[in-house]
Image (cartoon, grey):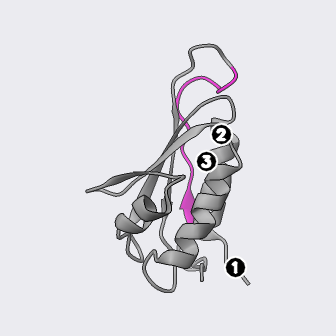
Amino acid sequence: MLSASSDSPAQTVQTQAAGPDEPGSPPVQATATVTLTEDLHARPAATLVRAAARFTATVTIATPTRQADARSMLAVIALTAVKGQTITFHADGPDAEPALAALTAALTTPQE
């Protein structure tokens, strides 16, 4: 289950350079802190993968030591992200910014 921490900012979104609709615009990036009650396991990984699948942008998720395609369930689980760790999302494509917003929200918004 995902949960947001009220003691510290649950997410920090940083986008870089030009907007995704401009031809030749560079990829965008966002960072978020893992605010799960446990480490990133199957259920929250599935939430991230489903969120990534809704967009055409190519999205990667990175920890300080590993990187994964956001559409690959096994790759996301293999990141072995732990509670409190910072995750960086990189997206490239026409809907890169909305994709980053959706994935960041999936990682930091409590699920019922």
- Give the residue at mark 3: 100
Task: Give how far across and how far down residue 61 sits, in percent.
Answer: 45, 52
The relative height of residue 28 versus residue 8 in the rendered view (above or below) is above
52 vs 37, left or right, is: right
Quadrant where the C terminus is found in the figure: bottom right
User: Looking at the image, do the residues carrying marks 3 and 2 touch, with CB atoms under 8 Å apart?
Assistant: yes
User: Looking at the image, do the residues carrying marks 1 and 3 touch, with CB atoms under 8 Å apart?
Assistant: no
Q: Main secondary structure of the magenta part?
A: loop
Task: Rate crowding at label 3 as few (under 14), some (14 to 19) or many (20 or more) other CA atoms within 10 Å.
Answer: many
Task: Rate crowding at label 2 as few (under 14), some (14 to 19) or many (20 or more) other CA atoms within 10 Å.
Answer: many
The relative height of residue 73 versus residue 27 in the rendered view (above or below) is below
Instruction: Kindly state the secondary structure of the residue where label 3 is placed.
Output: helix
Mark 3 or mark 1, which is nearer the start of the sequence? Answer: 3
Task: Give how far across and how far down residue 43 sits, in percent.
Answer: 57, 77
Looking at the image, the residue that sits furthest to the top is 23
Q: What is the span of residues highlighted in magenta in the rendered image?
A: 9-21
Q: Amino acid at mark 3?
A: Leu
- Give the residue at mark 2: 97
Q: Amino acid at mark 1?
A: Gln
Instruction: Kindly state the secondary structure of the residue where label 1 is placed.
Output: loop
In the rendering, which numbered label is found on residue 111?
Answer: 1
Instruction: Kindly state the secondary structure of the residue where label 2 is placed.
Output: helix
Structural distance between the alpha carbons of marks 1 and 3: 18 Å
Task: Give how far across and how far down residue 12 sits, in percent.
Answer: 54, 55
Structural distance between the alpha carbons of marks 3 and 2: 5 Å
**Foreground of the two, 43 or 1:** 43
